[in-house]
Image: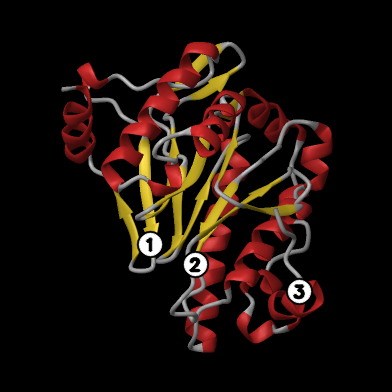
């Protein structure tokens, strides 16, 4: 794990350049302006399990479809892997209301910067932008009803030799680079343990797997997590229900279709 250096320079790129920073145009502490009624509504819902890992094709980011309200299943059609721009992904765990708003803000921020500055925001600045939103969400986090613990995957587009990287965050906004994998949400301990074992003793290791193997692994990880965590939505190949899965490479983002999931799964199980 590493913490990005030159925070002052990155903060200046995000906060001091008013002409290129959409966040500077927003009210301060926008996520703290919640009424008691909104707080009670946000309290009920939680998005559960997401994870990301390196494979030979790039970075796989995956998640289940379940959102829970206490001990009840609120939805099994929640999309948790969100495209922020052509080369960055965010996986949400925690309060969906807050997380989706953060994702929409980042999408607008990145596009606003690109259009106004005629260049893409740097990867380091994107990472810090999400950190800033989490920090602005501190009042809701401390009150316990607006906690978000996301994952971020991106690539530095200005460097032709750059590889995709994964960052994970704590709910207060601290960000850390994950060497090989990261996970978040209620099913994450199981998934993190399996990925650690496979990276240390697997043959092949996840980072050496091709796309087909990595997709099958992602679905098996969610199936395993669902066995031990009621809040994690499982994978059901017999009903054509698979994980939400996106692949990030230098060429951009690719969504794995149901047909691809099915084809890879049938080959692995044959």
Expressed as whole percent of the image width and height from the top left, the position of residue 128 reads: 69, 64
How crowded pointer 1 is (Cα within 10 Å; few <14, some 14-19, many 20+) is rated as: many
Q: Is residue 52 above or below residue 16?
A: above
Residue at (66% x, 69% y) in the render: 23
Disc on the earlier residue, 2 or 1: 2
In the structure shown, which secondary structural element does the residue marked by tag 3 occupy?
helix
Label pair 2/1, CB-CB below 8 angstroms: yes
In the rendered image, residue 217, in percent from the top left (x then y), is placed at: 37, 33
SS of the residue at dot 1? Answer: strand
Q: Which residue is mark 2?
A: 155
Going 64% across and 28% down the picture, which residue do you hit? 41
Picture coordinates of residue 155, whole percent (x, y): 49, 67
In terms of depth relative to the viewer, which is nearer, 256 or 58? Answer: 58
Q: Are marks 1 and 3 in contact (CB under 8 Å)?
A: no
Disc with the residue nearer the chain's start (3 vs 2) = 3
Q: Residue 213: name its quadrant.
A: top left
**Residue at mark 3:** 11
Q: Nearer the viewer, residue 6 or 216?
A: 216
The alpha-carbon separation of the residues under discs 1 and 3 comes to 27 Å
**Which residue is tagged 1?**
249
| Residue occupying image coordinates x 31% and y 29% | 242
Q: Nearer the viewer, residue 86 or 76?
A: 86
Inter-mark Cα distance, 2 to 1: 8 Å
Quarter of the image where one finds residue 63: top left
Query: On the rendered structure, is 142 left or right of 147?
Result: right
* Residue in the image at 42% along x and 29% along y: 65
Q: Is residue 70 left or right of residue 155?
A: right
Task: Identify whether 202 is placed above or below 8.
Answer: above
Q: CA distance from mark 3 to mark 2?
A: 19 Å
Kindly report which numbered mark, 3 or 2, lies closer to the viewer in this rendering. Answer: 2
């Amino acid at each position: 794990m590493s913490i990005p250096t030159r925070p002052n320079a990155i903060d200046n790129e995000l906060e001091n350049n008013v002409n290129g920073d959409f966040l500077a145009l927003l009210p301060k502490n926008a996520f703290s302006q919640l009424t008691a009624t909104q707080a009670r509504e946000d309290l009920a819902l939680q998005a559960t399990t997401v994870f990301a890992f390196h494979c030979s094709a790039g970075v796989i980011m995956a998640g289940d479809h379940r959102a829970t309200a206490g001990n009840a299943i609120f939805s099994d059609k929640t999309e948790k892997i969100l495209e922020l721009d052509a080369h960055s992904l965010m996986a949400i765990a925690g309060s969906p209301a807050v997380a989706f708003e953060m994702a929409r803000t980042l999408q607008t921020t990145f596009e606003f910067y690109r259009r106004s500055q005629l260049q893409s925001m740097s990867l380091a600045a994107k990472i810090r932008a999400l950190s800033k939103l989490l920090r602005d969400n501190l009042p809701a986090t401390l009150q316990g009803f607006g906690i978000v613990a996301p994952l971020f995957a991106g690539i530095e587009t200005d460097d032709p030799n750059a590889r995709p990287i994964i960052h994970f965050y704590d709910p207060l906004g601290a960000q850390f680079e994950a060497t090989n994998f990261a996970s978040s949400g209620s099913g994450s301990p199981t998934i993190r343990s399996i990925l650690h074992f496979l990276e240390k003793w697997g043959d092949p290791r996840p980072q050496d797997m091709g796309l087909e193997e990595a997709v099958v692994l992602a679905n098996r990880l969610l199936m395993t997590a669902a066995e031990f965590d009621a809040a994690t939505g499982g994978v059901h190949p017999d009903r054509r229900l698979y994980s939400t899965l996106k692949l990030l490479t230098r060429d951009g983002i690719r969504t794995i279709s149901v047909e691809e999931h099915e084809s890879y799964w049938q080959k692995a199980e044959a």
